[in-house]
Image (cartoon, rainbow, N blue to C red):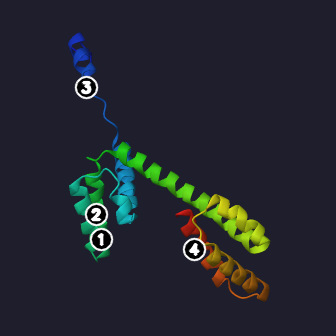
């Protein structure tokens, strides 16, 4: 009898086999988890605290920061990648996307404040009234003084120390 002929019995057994991803696919997924671990390690502590991470992974990340040796860090990063397998990756990615949206919102807000700064330096008191309508918490006396200094520095071609000070004042008034 030919050994290579399939019987009905062998077809039933084959249908029960589970197809697993190939080795390359598994390696690719592990590399993605390792990269995600690197991204989490590079984050500031206050952002990392908002992520849905296990205590074991947080301890491994803290340990990573205490390791001075480059090779030991590389090995420990592999370990962090391994721990990432048991984490809620979808939740982590959602939180990272939220961080990114918040950062983009801050950047847009800072660009608007930069436009306000230029307008305040160029237009003077006309722009001050508009700015106070939008941000009433600002100290008017300090705002006008810093504006005058920034305008004077710009006219004299000096470095923009007062312009930076004005930007800090605007950020404080906007609550950024």
Check disc 3 and report the residue beneath it.
17
Residue marked by disc 1: 65
Q: Earlier in the sequence, mark 4 or mark 1?
A: 1
On screen, residue 105 versus residue 11, left or right, reads right
Quickly name the residue at label 4. Answer: 168
* Disc 4 from disc 1: Cα separation: 32 Å
Residue 176 is situated, as x and y percent measured from the top left of the image, at 52, 64
C-beta proximity under 8 Å, tags 4 and 1: no
Determine whether 57 is above or below 116 in the image: above
The nearer-to-camera label among 1 and 3 is: 1
Q: Nearer the viewer, residue 135 or 73?
A: 135
Q: Return the x and y of residue 66 as percentages of the image width and height.
A: 26, 73
Mark positioned earlier in the residue sequence (1 or 3)? 3
Residue drawn at the location 67% of the way across and 81% of the way down? 145
How far across and how far down the image is residue 94, in percent? 42, 45
Write down the quadrant of residue 153 in the picture.
Answer: bottom right
Q: Quadrant of the rendered structure where residue 18 is?
A: top left
Distance between the alpha carbons at the discs numbered 1 and 2? 7 Å
As measured in the structure, the alpha-carbon distance from the residue carrying label 4 to the one carrying label 3 is 64 Å
Front residue of 4/176: it is: 176
CB within 8 Å, label 1 to label 2: yes
């Amino acid at each position: 009898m030919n050994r290579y002929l399939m019987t009905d019995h062998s077809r039933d057994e084959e249908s029960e086999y589970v197809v697993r991803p190939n080795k390359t696919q598994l390696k690719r997924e592990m590399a993605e988890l390792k990269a995600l671990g690197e991204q989490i390690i590079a984050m500031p502590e206050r952002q990392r605290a908002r992520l849905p991470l296990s205590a074991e992974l947080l301890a491994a990340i803290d340990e990573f920061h205490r390791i001075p040796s480059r090779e030991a860090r590389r090995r420990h990063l592999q370990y962090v990648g391994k721990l990432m397998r048991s984490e809620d990756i979808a939740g982590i990615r959602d939180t990272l996307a939220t961080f990114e949206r918040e950062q983009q919102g801050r950047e847009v807000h800072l660009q608007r404040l930069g436009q306000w700064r230029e307008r305040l330096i160029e237009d003077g008191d006309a722009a001050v009234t508009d700015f106070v309508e939008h941000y009433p918490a600002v100290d008017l006396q300090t705002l006008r003084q810093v504006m005058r200094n920034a305008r004077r520095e710009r006219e004299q071609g000096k470095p923009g120390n007062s312009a930076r000070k004005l930007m800090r004042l605007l950020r404080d008034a906007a609550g950024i």
